[in-house]
Image: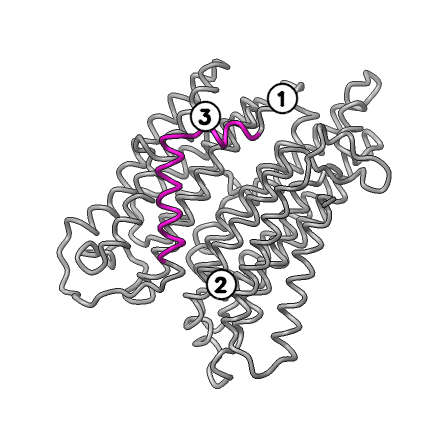
Amino acid sequence: MITAPLLEIAVLALGMVILMTEAFVGKINKRVLAFAAIVGLAIVLLASFFVAPSPSPSYATGFWNFYAADRLAMFFKQFALVTTIFVLIMTIDYGPVVRSSFPGATPQAGLGEFVALPLFTCAGLMYLVSAIDFVFIFVALELVTVSFYVLVSFTRRNPMTLEAGTKYLVLSALSTAFLVYGIAWIFGATGQTNLHRLTAALANAGGDSGAALLGMVFVLVALGFKIAAVPFQIWVPDVYQGAPTPATAYLSVGSKAAGFVVLIRVLQPFMNLPQTQRLIFVIALLTLIYGNLAALPQTNLKRLLAYSSIAHAGYLLIGVVCFDVRAITFYLVAYLLMTLLSFAVLMIVAQQTGEEISDFDGLAKRSPFLAFAMLIGMVSLAGVPFTAGFLGKFYIFYTAVLQRQIALVVVGVITVGCGFYYYLKVVRAMYWQSDSKTEVIPVNGLSRVAISALVVATIWLGVYPQPILDVLRH
């Protein structure tokens, strides 16, 4: 019988094997390590379907009382594994850029570490979605963050990458300080770090809910950095633009998804307090407005996707205000598909031309396959019907209407209109702008399969969403 903790142990062991092989086996094609990592994660993903989720996180007892293996945790473990597999496929294409950042070294220098780091990040994300104790949340979050430090600044000879790494390091360290300070306040007020015992402690009329609420605000600040919510989003545009593209994609999808799962778990004991809902309401409103308006004038596609990431955090926060886990889950799955699809195409095109939207001019003539894939990614991000992005927004707005959050729905619908403008700028460049470039952009077989799978899944979930909606029904 496979138990849930074995999944993380397997991913960590795989990461160590890849790292040790890279360090001590000299005559090996480093691309083989990437393929080995992909196969290893695929096996772990398959094994995860044979783990029976616990009916409730509160069933965790004894030594494992900090760890949940409920349906939510198991689903997002699989989410982290799928994300990492796609990111590793992207790293294979990104190999030439990694090698160019190590001048004078061996032809495949750095590639092994660049493959191993996402595995450690994946293990951290898997631990994070199972964490039901503040101490374990902190440890798992640090494993994820430290791995991202290195990934973001990996091509460190690039000045923009170095700047991105420095900003991410400083602001992540600041968010960690807020997290620890918030945990200290909550523990001081309730005497608990376990989230389920914390619920009981807050229900006790003798508890100091004011001090615990202050601690929750500090924790919310820390998680606001991770999910890129306003006003904690200042690091996002520069880090997204400067980091290696696979790291940007991973940061955009994996970190955000795990951050929202932790946010759901942490807020659950506090959602009965009216101050909590009002605070999330204000943050959601500001995030929606800032993310969409700041994306309007962008000409660099990576920066546009960075501000887009902030905007989508706003839509997800509407789901948090309504505390609808199924709507949030579906939106995160849709966001995974359309964001990874957009970054995969961006990475391939950027190595040939550049990251500006103008570099996509005439892409439909140079590579109809990549242009169609980016078209699907953009229209799904915008929320065009028959795509996963449309249904993701629909379910979020539907649950907000049911709970009479009319202000959030009105602002959300208006900002969706802004999204149509800046996403369709990319479509216009690909299909309507003429360009003098005529060279064909090559796409290797594995990337073509991965991009095709993302396109099919984006359209399929936009037509038939039931499989994802059924996951958390029970």
Residue at image coords 30%, 43%: 376
Going from N to C along the chain, the mark reached first, 1 or 2, is 2
> Taking 396 as reference, is 45 above or below it?
below
Dot 1: few (<14), some (14–19), or many (≥20) neighbours within 10 Å? few
Residue position for label 1: 275
Q: Quadrant of residue 56?
A: top right
Residue at image coords 39%, 59%: 447
Residue type, numbered disc 2: Glu
Q: Quadrant of the C terminus?
A: top right
**Could you tell me what secondary structure mostly forms the magenta stretch?**
helix
Give the percent coordinates (x, y) of residue 40: 59, 59
Give the percent coordinates (x, y) of residue 404: 47, 13
Residue type, numbered disc 3: Ile
Q: CA distance from mark 3 to mark 2?
A: 36 Å
The mark tally for this picture is: 3
Residue mark closest to the camera, 3 vs 2: 3
Say if mark 1 contacts mark 3, CB within 8 Å. no
Q: Secondary structure at mark 3?
A: helix
Dot 2: few (<14), some (14–19), or many (≥20) neighbours within 10 Å? some
Span shown in magenta: 448-471
Residue type, numbered disc 1: Gln
Residue at image coords 64%, 70%: 19
Q: Would you say residue 466 sits in the magenta stretch?
A: yes
Residue position for label 3: 396
Q: Quadrant of residue 445?
A: bottom left
Residue position for label 2: 163
Considering depth in this image, is 115 or 286 the residue closer to the camera? 115
Q: Quadrant of residue 266?
A: top right
Dot 3: few (<14), some (14–19), or many (≥20) neighbours within 10 Å? many
Residue 374 in the figure: left or right of residue 252 = left
